[in-house]
Image (cartoon, grey):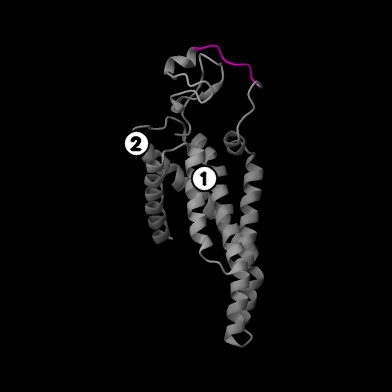
Amino acid sequence: MMLSPRVTCPRCGREVYLSERVCPFCNTPLTTQSAGSPPFLEGDIPPDWRERVLTLPLGVVTAAVILAGMMDGIVVAAAVRSLQRSLLGHHDLLVRFSALAIPVMMAITLLKWLLDTFILWIAVRITGSIAGEPFRVGFWEGYRTMLPITMLMVLNSSVTLLVALLTQLWLLLIVAWFIDLFILRYFLEMDWYEVFLLNAVLGFFSCVTGGLL
C-alpha cells in the first residue's frame, strides 16, 4: 500500500517501495534489511508519475480543484436555465442562482474536496488496519498526500459530468466510478480487494457526513 517505506534494492541499487516485496526491476526479494543498503545517488532514477502527482505543489492542486468547480458551475447553470425554460416564465430567483452558479460551485467544490480528503485519509487508515498494514505517518503528512488523489477524483467527476451533459450519455457516470477505483488502486498501491474495501468504508463515511450536512 502507499506510504510504505522506500528501500534500496541490494542487487540493482534502485529505490523501490518495500510493499513491492520483490524488486520490479531485477526480481530480487526485498526485506526490511534492504533499508540499510547503500543509498543510490539522487537523480539516478527519475520519479515515476505516481510520485510526480503526489508531490505536486499545493497551489497547482488547488487550482485544478477550482477548475473542476467551474465545470460543475457550468453544469448547474445549464440545468437552471433548462428549468427556467420549462417553467415558461421569468423567475428572478432562478436568474440570480444561474448567475451565481459558477462561483458558488467553486466554493462548494473546494470545501467538498477538503472534506473528501479527510474522509479518504480516515478510510485509508481504517482499511490499512483491517488489511494488517497500519500507517505510521503523521496526520498532516498523510492528509497532504491524499490531496492530489482526491483532486484527480474531483476532476474525473467534473469532467465526466460535463461531457455527459453535452453528449447526454449519462452512463458515463458509471465509467467515472470505475476510473475512481483505478485512481485509488494506482496511487495507493492497493490490491483490488483493498480498493473495494476502501470504497465501502469511504461510501459509509460519505453517507454519514452527507446525512449530518
Q: Nearer the viewer, residue 33 or 23?
A: 23
- Are there few (<14), some (14-19), or many (20+) residues within 10 Å of tag 1? some
Q: Which of 178 and 90 is in front in this view?
A: 178
Q: Residue at x 57, y 36 (%)?
A: 50
Badge 2 amino acid: Ala
Badge 1 amino acid: Ile
Q: Residue at x 40, y 39 (%)?
A: 125
Left/right placement of residue 154 relative to residue 208 reads right
Measured along the vertical axis of the image, is residue 96 above or below residue 30? below
Measured along the vertical axis of the image, is residue 163 above or below residue 179? below
Q: Residue 95 carries which label?
A: none
Q: What element carries label 2?
A: loop
Residue 115 appears at what percent x and percent y?
49, 51
- Quarter occupied by the N terminus: top left
Residue 204 appears at what percent x and percent y?
37, 53
Left/right placement of residue 83 relative to residue 191 reads right
Q: Distance between the residues labelled 1 and 2?
A: 19 Å
Please say whether residue 93 is visible from this viewpoint. Answer: yes
Q: Give the range drawn in magenta.
A: 37-42
Q: Residue at x 51, y 34 (%)?
A: 141
Prevailing secondary structure of the magenta residues: loop
- Residue that protrudes farthest toward the bottom in the picture: 88
Q: Residue 183 carries which label?
A: 1
Q: How many labels does the image show?
A: 2
Please say whether residue 115 is visible from this viewpoint. Answer: no
Residue 58 appears at what percent x and percent y?
62, 41
Residue 39 part of the magenta segment: yes
Label 1 vs 2, first from the N-terminus: 2
Residue 156 appears at what percent x and percent y?
57, 53
Residue 196 part of the magenta segment: no
Q: Is mark 1 on a helix, strand or loop?
A: helix
* Residue highlighted by disc 2: 131
